Image (tube, rainbow, N blue to C red):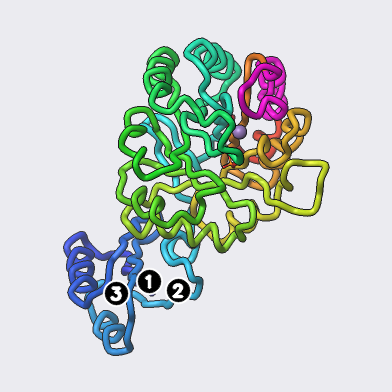
Amino acid sequence: MVIIVESGADEQTVANLIDKVRALGFTPHPIFGVEKTVIAVVGHKTQEKTDILATMPGVQQIIPILKPYKLVGREVKAETSVISVRDDLDIGGDRFVVMAGPCAVESYDQLSQIARYVKQAGAQMLRGGIFKPRTSPHDFQGLREEGIPIAKAVKEETGLPFITEVVDIRDIEMLHEVADIYQVGARNMQNFALLTELGKVDRPVMLKRAMSGTVEDLLQAAEYVAVEGNAQVILCERGIRTFESSTRNTLDISAVIAMKRFSHLPVVVDPSHASGHDWMVPALSKAAVAAGADGLLIETHSRPQEAMVDGHQSLTPASFKQTMEELAAFCEAAGRTL
Ligand code: PEP
Ligand code: MN
């Protein structure tokens, strides 16, 4: 259920309410919105407990949350959450955010070169997998530990915040040194143990939709992170498996609209994994803006033909720059700045 707090209620009244919620055996999740303060109340509810809460000072209304996800739904928070990355970049605000970089961190020279290119072209964030979840165990699994000092050096050089995937609970701590956003990959969307651990970390998490995950599955996965106390979750649509064989996956653009409608969390689109083709990325990026996405995750490589992973879907510096230039007009039309 959600407690709508009276608009004039002072801090003490809200604090008393939160204490009462806890005393009744629930977990309170206060959400301080621009328009109103609400307290999402999670736990097994009874009529008696609901009646007690209803008589508390400061309570305007108590309403049940009908959706299976309680904290990440629009029912508890009408306005989109703005997730702050490193205190200098907002995701979910007016500014459309582009994260770009290679699929995998391969070497210092590779990451440093592409980072400079994407920054010059206007990307606000750098991506790069240090740990790679690969379909085949024989394929390159990422530089792992060796990738950390590389990412650190390139971050210092460029000043760009960095997003990288965490595939295992055991790597959360190591990656904390370089990850400004922890990416949870499609293959791990329902790794509930990993989600729960990330819920205890004070850093944003970007959760990618599983290849066969519904929007509701994704929102419930996001709930696993939020319920532990980390509300800084970003959703990512990266295409789903369908019968279509002309693309690696099918970009489910309607899912972006659904996510935006049902959840207050920001939504990012990954047109690279969604299509598997570099030549589709520019148009899909524009489609993402039109659908109301808050940002993009784009794979780029200085020499895609030599990339260790996903070269065929990586933009060259020149095509990335052109894509950014073309995107600006689409962002403006959608009321966003790039
Ligand atoms: C990636 O972003 O490099 C990646 C592995 O993506 P996904 O989990 O969407 O396949
Ligand atoms: Mn990739």
Query: Disc 1, ligand 1: is the CB inside 8 Å?
Result: no
Quarter of the picture holding the N terminus: bottom left
Q: Residue furthest bottom?
A: 48
Residue 27 percent coordinates (x, y) = 28, 68
Mark before the other along the chain sequence, 1 or 2 = 1
252 lies above or below 4: above
User: Residue at 37% across / 19% down in the picture?
Assistant: 149
| Picture quadrant where residue 301 is located | top right
Q: Is residue 315 magenta?
A: yes
Query: Of helix, strand and loop, which one carries label 3?
Result: strand
Q: Which residue is mark 1?
A: 2
- Look at label 3 and name its amino acid: Val
Q: Which residue is mark 2?
A: 65
Mark before the other along the chain sequence, 3 or 1 = 1
Mark before the other along the chain sequence, 3 or 2 = 3
Q: Which residue is mark 3?
A: 59
Q: Is residue 202 magenta?
A: no
Q: Nearer the viewer, residue 2 or 104?
A: 104
Task: Estimate how packed mark 1 is, as few (under 14), some (14 to 19) or many (20 or more) residues with alpha carbons within 10 Å.
Answer: many
Mark 3 or mark 1, whichever is nearer to me: 1
- Look at label 2 and name its amino acid: Ile
| Picture quadrant where residue 5 is located | bottom left
What is the distance, in whole Å, between disc 1 and disc 2 at their CAs? Answer: 7 Å
User: Residue at 59% across / 56% down in the picture?
Assistant: 259
Residue segment shown in magenta:
304-328
User: Residue at 19% across / 63% down in the picture?
Assistant: 15
